[in-house]
Amino acid sequence: MVFATTLRQERFEFADLRTVLARASEEKSGDQLAGLAARSERERVAAKLVLAELPLGIFLEQPLLDPDEDEVSRLLLDTLDRKASQGIRSATVGEFRELLLDDACTAENIARLQKGILPEMAAAVARLMSNKDLVLAASKIRNVTRCRNTMGERGVLGVRVQPNHPTDDLGGILLATLDGLLYGCGDAVIGVNPATESVDTVATILHGVDRLIRHLDIPTQGCCLAHLTTQLACLARGAPIDLLFQSIAGTEAANRSFGINLALLREGRERVLEHHRQREVTWVGDNVMYFETGQGSALSAEAHHGIDQLTLEARAYGVARAFEPFLVNSVVGFIGPEYLYDERQIVRAGLEDHFMGKLLGLPMGVDVCYTNHAAADQNSADNLLMLLALAGCNYFMGVPCADDVMLNYQSTSYHDAVGMRQLLGLRPAPEFQAWLEASGIVHADGHLLEGNGRQQLLGRLGEVLEVG
């Protein structure tokens, strides 16, 4: 089916729905690399005009990937709430944008629609929104999840402490973790990326982080971001798992390149849920998965099937939604300038990802980051950080001095998180806030305290290491 429009006497034709979506996307170096991007700004505008007039139902009628050949497509269609989608199916993409931005459209209205929104619908409407629109629409939505604590409530800004170490030294990891705790960070998760993908190393990290959490009685989650199969091997050896992590993508082939499929994700989730039932831990909910995504991942795996990177990112969120995760985040600038060239593209992608994930019902965080060879710097990261905080982002990364010494990329620091909380009057997760106050780390108004509480907590790190 050919889609066409005339713009100032110039006719533009688009061979299929994939082409309309790709040409309507904002400029991304990844789409240009794949040969999918608009060839001019006029063509981009023409594609947006065509897209705005398409009914949302067309994405159900014309799947971008055959569900008989791609298990992600099949999952997205099988898990869609058809009753919830009935009310918006006949609306055009442009009308859907107007609905979401209307003052009368509340968080409750959106919540009733979320499970009826196909990821391709979310990707389509994101293309018609300005950066301000993406912030405004996302700010209405709150997706709350629970594991050892409660994340995502209005007024809450969480932080993942990311205490990576280039040699996986447990003492270094725990010291960096404690540093983050003393800044009021770590309520989202204490999440370590291991330098070595081995069962022994990952198990040591899992046990060490768990000892710290138990010894200090911290209401938060631990996680080691190794491959899912490595984590499950650690679980079989008796290592504790609070959150099961995995990177995911928007096509079956891209997930296969990660060494996973949907059956493995299901098995992992069930095993961790059973593990939780056997542990003597107070759980406030059963959201046990942690997923990371990023625009360009399917293209980098040569598994994009001619679909643009924004749409594939939305499809990854559709995969995540099916597993009721505690955390999801886009590592927005991590893949590199081949996919998001400069700060303008990174900022745009970060706002798109956050909006789409929130619209689909996910507890979205963003790793506001960039690689050292991208045309970006810490000021541009600050800009995106502030925009996402205004948009109601669930959590950010807390990396010592914002410089990850193991992964060699730039992110956001503990200080950045404190700044955003103070600037916008935000708090950590409620259970974590109570612990911070009881430990003498923060005042009831959220401001950091200096004094004995901080010194006592620092002194107890030695006890944790001695237990190990």
Image (cartoon, rainbow, N blue to C red):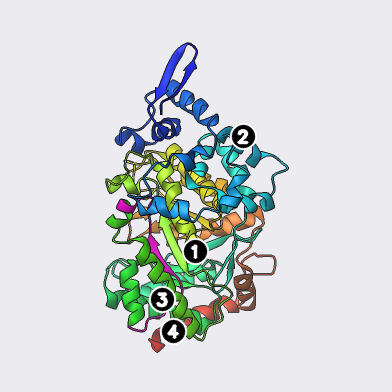
Queried whether the magenta region covers residue 252, the answer comes back as yes
Which residue in the structure is indicated by mark 3?
A: 271
Q: CA distance from mark 1 to mark 3?
A: 14 Å
State which quadrant residue 142 falls in. bottom right
Q: Nearer the viewer, residue 77 or 197?
A: 77
Identified by mark 4, the residue type is Val
N-terminal label among 1 and 2: 2
- Evaluate if marks 4 and 2 touch, with contact meaning CB atoms under 8 Å apart: no
Label 1: state its secondary structure. Answer: loop
Q: Are marks 2 and 3 in contact (CB under 8 Å)?
A: no
4 vs 2, front mark: 2
Task: Give SS at disc 4.
Answer: helix
Q: Nearer the viewer, residue 38 or 1?
A: 1
Q: Nearer the viewer, mark 4 or mark 1?
A: 1
Q: Which mark is residue 95?
A: 2
Q: Position of residue 183 (x, y in %)?
A: 54, 66
Q: Quick one: SS at disc 3?
A: helix
Which residue is rendered at x = 30% and y = 52% of the image? Answer: 253
Label 1 vs label 2: CA separation?
30 Å
| Res. 306 visible in picture | yes
At a point 56% along the width and 76% down the height, the residue shown is: 219
Residue with the mark numbered 4: 464
Give the residue number, with chain letter if any, for mark 1.
325
Magenta region: 237-253
Q: Earlier in the sequence, mark 4 or mark 2?
A: 2
Mark toward the start of the polypeptide (2 vs 3): 2
Residue 16: x percent and y percent? 39, 31
Residue pictured at 34% horizontal, 51% vertical: 70
Tell me the mark number nearer the camera, choosing from 3 and 4. Answer: 3
Verify CB contact (< 8 Å) between mark 1 and mark 2.
no
Q: Quadrant of the C terminus?
A: bottom left
Q: CA distance from mark 2 to mark 3?
A: 43 Å
